[in-house]
């Protein structure tokens, strides 16, 4: 392991196992194993997968209605888009609706530069977090402690929570959102451990 904090966290996960090993209860072990077994031998492919989110980042696709959701997206997402532009010199185009908008190759290359400086453990955690929340910008903001895991969850679930508030609870959707929240918290914890 790259640091003692992560090694201790994984040891704690193993210590909590009983006669039957439950891999799903060991998120740090899973992400560390992914770093060693999948990211290390194919770092370029993992980077490309993460970078694909820069082209389709959740924060760049805004609702064209209703006005209440538009306002929530602007308030929650726009400061992070502006943060990414300032922090990484990587401006992103924002659009209304779901029609694809091409991001500049220069911005994508700025993000590639950030990823290329990460070790395999950091990249494993960031890839997992990016996939979980659907946004490279949100994942980087968590990594850089611009936002925390709970703020990330609120931001990436904004549309679904708006629909639930408008139309009522859906058991299947709520279960999916809870799993997503767990994935985000686990990846954020892993990244925090790796950074120590």
Image (tube, helix red, strand yellow):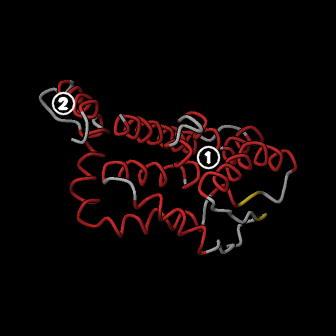
Seen from the viewer's position, the closer of residues 89 and 176 is 89
Disc 2 versus disc 1: distance between alpha carbons? 31 Å
As drawn, the residue found furthest toward the right would be 67
Q: Quadrant of the N terminus?
A: top left
Which callout, 2 or 1, points at the residue further toward the start of the chain?
Answer: 2
In the picture shown, does residue 2 fall above or below 48? above
**Residue 5: which quarter of the image?**
top left
Q: Nearer the viewer, residue 1 or 49?
A: 1
Packing grade of label 2 (10 A; few <14, some 14-19, many >=20) is: some
Residue 20 % position (x, y): 15, 33
Residue at 35%, 69% in the rendered image: 44
Q: Position of residue 51 (x, y in %)?
A: 49, 65
Asked if residue 148 is positioned above or below residue 88 in the image, the reply reads above
Q: Which residue is mark 2?
A: 14
Identify the residue shown where x is 61% and y is 46%: 156
Does residue 185 appear left or right of residue 63 in this picture? Answer: left
Q: Going by the image, does 40 lie left or right of 47?
A: left
Q: Which mark is residue 188?
A: none
Task: State the residue position of label 1.
Answer: 156
User: SS class of the residue under badge 2?
Assistant: helix
Residue that sits furthest to the left in the current view: 19
Crowding at dot 1, Cα within 10 Å, few <14 / some 14-19 / many 20+, comes out as: many
Element carrying mark 1 = helix
Disc 2 to disc 1: CB gap under 8 Å: no
In x, y percent, where is residue 21? 17, 35
- Front in this rendered view, residue 122 or 46: 122
């Amino acid at each position: 392991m790259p640091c003692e904090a992560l090694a201790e966290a994984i040891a704690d996960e193993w210590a909590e196992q009983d006669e039957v090993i439950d891999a799903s209860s060991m998120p740090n072990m899973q992400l560390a194993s992914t770093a060693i077994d999948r990211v290390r031998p194919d770092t370029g492919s993992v980077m490309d997968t993460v970078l694909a989110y820069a082209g389709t980042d959740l924060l760049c696709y805004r609702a064209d209605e209703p006005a209440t959701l538009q306002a929530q997206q602007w308030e929650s997402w726009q400061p992070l888009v502006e943060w990414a532009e300032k922090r990484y010199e990587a401006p992103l185009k924002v659009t209304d609706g779901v029609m694809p908008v091409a991001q500049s190759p220069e911005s994508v290359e700025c993000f590639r530069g950030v990823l290329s400086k990460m070790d395999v453990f950091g990249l494993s955690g960031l890839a997992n977090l990016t996939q979980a929340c659907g946004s490279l910008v949100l994942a980087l903001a968590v990594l850089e402690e611009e936002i925390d895991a709970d703020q990330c969850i609120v931001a990436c679930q904004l549309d679904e929570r708006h629909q639930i508030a408008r139309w009522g609870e859906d058991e299947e959707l709520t279960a999916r959102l809870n799993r997503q929240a767990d994935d985000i918290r686990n990846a954020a914890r892993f990244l925090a451990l790796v950074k120590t």
